[in-house]
Image (cartoon, rainbow, N blue to C red):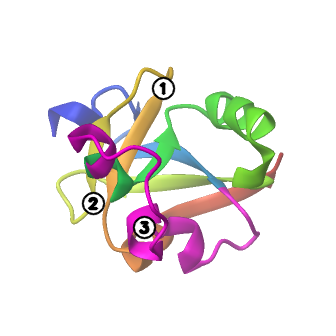
Amino acid sequence: MGAMAAVHDVPGEEARVCYRIVTADPPTLADFTSNEARGVPPRRRDPETLRLWGGISVFETEQQARLQATLFPRLGQHIAALRVPEGGAIRVERTTRTEGHYTLWGEPADLLACVLSVVVI
């Protein structure tokens, strides 16, 4: 999957590691449920916003996720590292203008199963 190329490679494996701001340790399904699935209305109704609304935000590095969590504390006080298998059920795409921002689309249970570790911010 070419869109995953910039997310950290896991040596010797066909997977990538990325970082998600979460509300709890351990994270729950709610931490990996899109705003669309939770019934949260988007701020804008343009096609790109609506497309991204069905996914969840992650970052290329823990530091990028930490910065976003500092700027937007309502997002959560923990960062989960996720190992996302390449070519699996989870789709990954580099999105938005925010440095290191990616969007993942997949079932919350599949995303939760990718969690490697969680740190406090």
Q: Position of residue 9 (x, y in %)?
A: 38, 35
Amino acid bearing label 3: Leu
Residue lying at 68% horizontally and 34% vertically, measured from the top left:
68
Residue that numbered label 3 is attached to: 111
Dot 2 alpha-carbon crowd within 10 angstroms: few under 14, some 14 to 19, many 20 or more: some
Dot 3 alpha-carbon crowd within 10 angstroms: few under 14, some 14 to 19, many 20 or more: many
In which image quadrant can residue 105 be found?
A: bottom left
Amino acid bearing label 1: Gly
Q: Is residue 10 left or right of residue 54?
A: right
Dot 1 alpha-carbon crowd within 10 angstroms: few under 14, some 14 to 19, many 20 or more: many
In which image quadrant can residue 115 be found?
A: bottom right
Q: From the viewer's perspective, is residue 56 above or below residue 99? A: below
Q: In the rendered structure, which segment of residues is drawn in magenta? A: 22-50
Q: Identify the image quadrant of the N terminus.
A: top left
Q: Are marks 1 and 2 in contact (CB under 8 Å)?
A: no
Residue that numbered label 2 is attached to: 90
Spatial CA span between label 3 and label 1: 19 Å
Q: Is residue 86 left or right of residue 120?
A: left
Q: Secondary structure at mark 1?
A: loop
* Tag shown at residue 66: none
Q: Is residue 112 left or right of residue 14?
A: right
Along the polypeptide, which appears first: circle 3 or circle 2?
2
Along the polypeptide, which appears first: circle 3 or circle 1?
1
Q: Secondary structure at mark 3?
A: helix
Spatial CA span between label 1 and label 2: 18 Å
Q: Identify the image quadrant of the C terminus.
A: top right
In which image quadrant can residue 78 be found?
A: bottom right
User: Is residue 30 or residue 3 the one in the foreground?
Assistant: 30
Q: Position of residue 79 (x, y in %)?
A: 69, 51
Residue that numbered label 1 is attached to: 100
